[in-house]
Amino acid sequence: MADDGDGFPLHKAVFENDLQTLSRLLRKHDVATKDKHGNTALHLAVMLGRKECVQLLLKHDAPVKVKNGLGWTVLAEAVSYGNRPTISSLVRKFRQQSREQMEERRPNLVEALNRINDFYMELKWDFQSWVPLVSRILPSDICKIYKSGANIRLDTTLVDFSDMRWERGDISFIFNGDAKPNESLTVLDNITKVYQKVRYEESEMEIEDEVDLLMSTDILAAQISTKSISFARAQSGWIFRGR
């Protein structure tokens, strides 16, 4: 009977900190393979502190955003163990993979947006708690979504929420499907009348600032329940007008 090492050779090489074997195995095995706990080889390398294995796996484009069986990403695991060089490497790879994924999906997204009719939609959401009366003081918001051609605008009033404190504002996110990839996303602050283009290239200082933020804040795993989501068609006519 084969053991787990035979079933997950990449994980075994990481566990044994065998860089030579790991390098050889990466030529013919899927770097994103998960073990029975949902951990990739990169998850395991981070949790065991195998720094050289981490760098080798990242060099072979091991996925950083994937979650294990407990719902934690590789980056979240790295933050919990607190090794700054490893966290910095993962942040860089995370941004690179996110950019590549967006560029890969962009043509299909633009095509789909052009194919459907223009629309306006309101999305209401709120936080809930099992503690009596707490739900009443938790934040809620109505996001307004406008679609025109290959362009989308999302308006929201909840700017920040942490440690039971939230900040209200008037923020718009605009996606321009007709613009170049590095110019397609803009964030507007409608109160202060300023805007920021979302850039693909980040400076070393920006990356280190993000690492500082990750290491100084609580690690959270967010989930959303779709059971209570419902859609209501906006209706209007000669006799009535409702939503």
Image: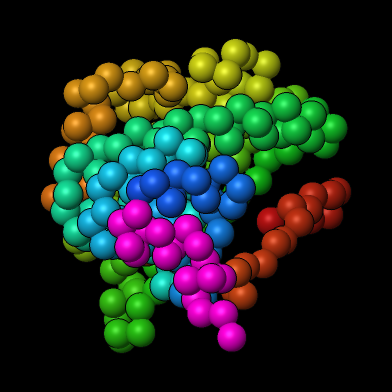
Q: Residue at x 42, y 65 (%)?
A: 12
Question: Magenta: predominant secondary structure element?
Answer: helix
Q: Is residue 85 above or below residue 19?
A: above
Residue 170 in view: no
Please give left or right for residue 164 compared with residue 70 in the image.
left
Q: Residue at x 71, y 34 (%)?
A: 109
Image quadrant where one finds the C terminus:
bottom right
Q: Which colouring convention does the figure follow?
A: rainbow
Residue 55 in view: yes
Q: Is residue 111 above or below residue 77?
A: above
Please give left or right for residue 177 compared with residue 57 in the image.
right
Residue 170 coordinates in the image, percent (x, y): 38, 36
Give the magenta-colored segment's residue range. Answer: 1-18
Q: Residue at x 59, y 86 (%)?
A: 1
Seen from the viewer's position, the closer of residues 164 and 137 is: 164
Residue 41 coordinates in the image, percent (x, y): 43, 58
Seen from the viewer's position, the closer of residues 11 and 241 is: 11
